[in-house]
Image (cartoon, rainbow, N blue to C red):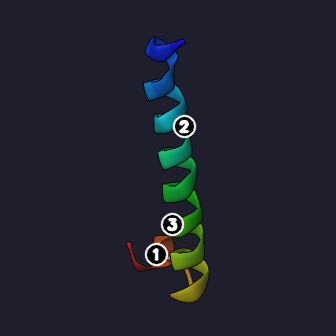
Amino acid sequence: KKNWSWIEECQLISEGIRRRVLEHTITHGGYLSQL
């Protein structure tokens, strides 16, 4: 079970990043439109 803890941690981190990107995108009117 200790071997799986890093995978769970990575999933939590990636979820946090996704949330931050989503919030950033909404706040700044979408970074995709700037490309």
Going from N to C along the chain, the mark reached first, 2 or 1, is 2
Q: Is residue 11 above or below residue 29?
A: above
For disc 1, the marked residue is 31
At numbered mark 2, what does the secondary structure look like: helix, strand or loop?
helix
Foreground disc of the pair 2, 1: 2
Which label number is shown at residue 11? Answer: 2
What residue is drawn where x is 48% and y is 57%? 17
Give the total of numbered labels: 3
At numbered mark 1, what does the secondary structure look like: helix, strand or loop?
loop
What residue is drawn where x is 50% and y is 46%? 14
Q: Amino acid at mark 3?
A: Val
For disc 3, the marked residue is 21
The front one of 24 and 3 is 3
Q: Is residue 21 above or below residue 25?
A: above
Q: Amino acid at mark 1?
A: Tyr
Going from N to C along the chain, the mark reached first, 2 or 3, is 2
